[in-house]
Image (tube, rainbow, N blue to C red):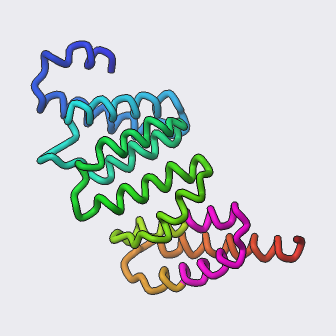
Amino acid sequence: METVYKYEKHFTETELKDVFIVYQLLYSQANQSDLLYAEKAFELYLHAIGKKYFIENNELSRFSFSNIVSIGIKLKEFKKTENFIEQHQQYINNDFRENTVSFNLSKVWYAQKLYKKAMPTLLQTEFKDVIWNLNAKHLLLKMLYETQEIEILQSNLISFKSYILRQKKIGYHKEFFLQIIHNFQYFNNYFARTG
């Protein structure tokens, strides 16, 4: 990758975009638990976005945006990740900007155990994307569990299950999230008995 950075000025923007996309795919296929690959991917993403290689028609994919945030969280680069969100949110399509920023900031705050910042954001945001809504509700459940807000957790488990059962086109996500609810209920009941 260092070679590409060194000779970057000798390539056209289109060629560089293709090179960075290939590197991004290689890093994403690499061992996800290896922090070295995560560091390289994070560096690559930030460099390529800084040069606007991943920005087309003044827009950055919300999925690429979220991938960068996830890698930053994995590396515990919380300040860099929050700066990235702040500096690049204007490239997210207007229809998804608020949801993308809210969801990703909540993930960063959750990773830092800043639940008082993350929880209100998740409670006040209705996510347009059903999968993101499911993930946001799951993140909220984890925070309620970790803060021992048992009554609120129980109420959210019931409404979450109802929400999942109403969804018709979420495929395997339905079973996945129903299993998560089951696990939360099991542990809740276990701790209530042994409490």
In which quadrant will I find the C terminus? Answer: bottom right
For the image, the number of numbered tags is: 0
- The reply, left or right, for residue 106 in relation to residue 65 is right
Residue 146 placement: quadrant: bottom right
- The magenta stretch spans which residues? 139-161
Q: Is residue 150 magenta?
A: yes
Of 105 and 172, nearer the camera is: 105
Residue found at x 45% / y 52%: 105
Residue at 43 percent of width and 40 percent of height: 81
- Residue 16, percent across and down? 18, 28
- The residue under the point 33% across, 71% down is 128
Q: Indicate yes or no whether the magenta region holds residue 68.
A: no
The residue under the point 36% across, 78% down is 169
List x then y, in percent, for residue 114: 59, 52
Main SS class of the magenta portion in the image: helix
- Please tell me whether residue 78 is drawn above or below residue 109 in the rendered image: above
Q: Is residue 106 above or below residue 1?
A: below
State the image coordinates of residue 55 (x, y, percent, origin top left). 19, 42
Left or right: residue 187 versus residue 169 is right
Q: Is residue 149 left or right of residue 49?
A: right
Name the image quarter holding residue 4: top left
Nearest the viewer among 42 and 183 is: 42
Q: Quadrant of the N terminus?
A: top left
x, y (%) of residue 12?
Answer: 10, 25
